[in-house]
């Protein structure tokens, strides 16, 4: 005799409950992860889950949900499973070839917009652009600016270009370069970067989402400071007088970054705190 109850497709509420339990041992945000993944499979916003908890996803949607859940249980970041992440109120495409956008990096945008004029043209370069979140956001918020996003990874730049096209931001371009090595332009008003700054022996590299992110976008030698030092040195030849350098760095690197900028001749060096009150971005004015 057929067990009708057992054969009944699971409701949205039931799927979320079982998924949250399944992820509890591998994710600190199990409930949120389950909701985001189910919304992705259903093609619906999270409000839909609240409004229709009794509805039954079809078999294909339920199967895809279970497949993604298993990958998430193994540690694969949610952003890589859905292929997108929000940054500065825009949805950006992301994949294993780029870092996952994080709220801490919005501080770079906030500080940059406070320095960039809105009423006249200016020139900005984003070093290590990855998915293009900084370059595209600054270009979108400052339509008169000319913004260049630079990365050494062709795959990353393909993602950045797709994001610019999807978001219809035309005043941004992208170039392959190892920092400034292949950049002929100079006289930038602003150089901004979220470079690799994690030391190779940092235990956080073996935890959470960063296990799946590209190591060359995370790790730097010299206790995480080599790329920051290179950018600061090279920017001297590419910033206009009174141009500004903005660098994201680790919470414990602020004093060392300030020392690097000071030794190179930058002035008005200031470290800014992120939303968690951690020293996250250091800025300096180039004054030759």
Image (cartoon, rainbow, N blue to C red):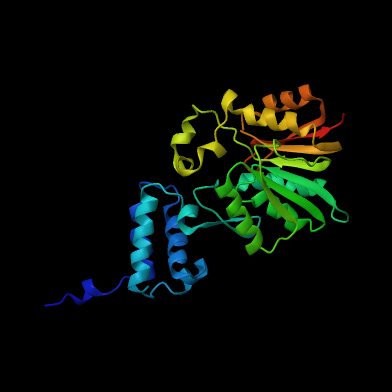
Q: In x, y percent, where is residue 173?
A: 71, 53
Image quadrant assignment for residue 178? top right
Instruction: Determine the residue positioned at 79% across, 52% down.
Output: 146
Could one spot residue 101 in this view of the protein? Answer: no
Task: Pick whichever, 189 or 12, lies toward us.
Answer: 189
Could one spot residue 6 in this view of the protein? Answer: yes
Image quadrant assignment for residue 248? top right
Q: Is residue 22 left or right of residue 199?
A: left
Instruction: Determine the residue positioned at 79% across, 56% down.
Output: 142
Q: In x, y percent, where is residue 238?
A: 79, 36
Q: Residue furthest left?
A: 1
Q: Is residue 28 left or right of residue 117?
A: left
Instruction: Determine the residue positioned at 45% across, 43% down.
Output: 212
With respect to residue 98, does 19 lie above or below?
Answer: below
With respect to residue 114, does 9 lie above or below?
Answer: below
- The image quadrant where one finds the N terminus is bottom left
Total numbered circles: 0
Q: In x, y percent, where is residue 3?
A: 17, 75
- The image quadrant where one finds the C terminus is top right
Q: In x, y percent, where is residue 97?
A: 52, 47
With respect to residue 233, does 128 lie above or below?
Answer: below
């Amino acid at each position: 005799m057929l067990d009708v109850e057992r054969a009944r497709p699971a409701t949205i509420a039931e799927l979320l409950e079982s998924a949250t339990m399944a992820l509890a041992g591998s994710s600190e945000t199990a409930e949120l992860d389950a909701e985001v993944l189910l919304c992705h499979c259903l093609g619906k916003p999270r409000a839909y889950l609240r409004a229709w908890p009794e509805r039954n996803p079809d078999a294909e949607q339920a199967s895809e949900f279970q497949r993604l859940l298993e990958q998430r249980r193994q540690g694969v970041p949610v952003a890589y499973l859905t292929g997108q992440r929000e940054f500065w109120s825009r949805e950006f495409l992301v994949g294993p070839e780029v870092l996952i956008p994080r709220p801490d990096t919005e501080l770079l945008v906030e500080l940059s917009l406070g320095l960039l004029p809105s009423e006249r043209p200016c020139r900005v370069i984003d070093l290590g652009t990855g998915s293009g979140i900084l370059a595209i956001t600054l270009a979108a918020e400052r339509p008169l600016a000319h913004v260049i996003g630079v990365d050494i990874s062709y795959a990353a730049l393909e993602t950045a270009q797709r994001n610019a096209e999807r978001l219809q931001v035309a005043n941004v371009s992208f170039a392959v370069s190892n920092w400034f090595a292949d950049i002929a332009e100079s006289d930038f008003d602003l150089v901004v970067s979220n470079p690799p700054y994690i030391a190779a022996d940092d235990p956080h590299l073996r935890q959470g989402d960063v296990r799946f992110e590209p190591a060359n976008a995370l790790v730097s030698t010299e206790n995480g400071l080599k790329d920051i030092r290179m950018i600061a040195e090279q920017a001297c030849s590419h910033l206009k007088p009174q141009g500004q350098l903005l660098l994201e760095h680790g919470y414990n690197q602020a004093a060392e970054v300030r020392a690097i900028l000071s030794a190179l001749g930058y002035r008005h060096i200031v470290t800014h705190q992120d939303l968690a009150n951690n020293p996250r971005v250091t800025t300096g004015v180039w004054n030759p």
